[in-house]
Amino acid sequence: MFAETFKFTFPVGRDNGISGVLGARGIPMTVFVAGDGRIVKRHIGYIAYGELSSNIEALLK
């Protein structure tokens, strides 16, 4: 319902089964995935912009 209300354009875990594949344990949850498809890190709960940015930048190196 939330995703529909805010017109998400990306898949939402509970709707497509991806939460099970990623091992989701809470909401919100951020999953950092390397270019080769490996899950590098999971973060459960609020994530500050600085932490989000630094994790993304590390993956892009």
Image (cartoon, rainbow, N blue to C red):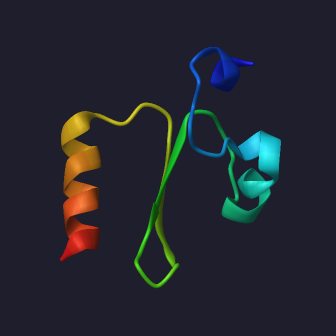
Horizontal and vertical percent position of residue 41 = 45, 63
* Quarter holding residue 14: top right
Residue drawn 18% across the image and 41% down it: 50
In this rendering, position of residue 44 left or right of residue 59: right
- How many marks the image carries: the answer is 0
Q: Residue furthest bottom?
A: 36
In this rendering, position of residue 4 left or right of residue 40: right
Residue 22's place in the image compared with 36, above or below, is above
In this rendering, position of residue 9 left or right of residue 56: right
Camera-nearest residue between 43 and 57: 57
* Quarter holding residue 59: bottom left
Q: Which residue lies furthest to the top in this view?
A: 5
Horizontal and vertical percent position of residue 47 = 36, 36
Residue 60's place in the image compared with 23, above or below, is below
Q: Quadrant of the C terminus?
A: bottom left
In this rendering, position of residue 28 left or right of residue 32: right
Residue drawn 46% across the image and 85% down it: 36
Camera-nearest residue between 8 and 19: 8
Residue drawn 19% across the image and 55% down it: 54
Residue drawn 24% across the image and 36% down it: 49
* Quarter holding residue 48: top left
Horizontal and vertical percent position of residue 7 = 59, 24
Horizontal and vertical percent position of residue 28 = 56, 34
Q: In which quarter of the image is the N terminus?
A: top right
Camera-nearest residue between 49 and 10: 10
Camera-nearest residue between 2 and 42: 2
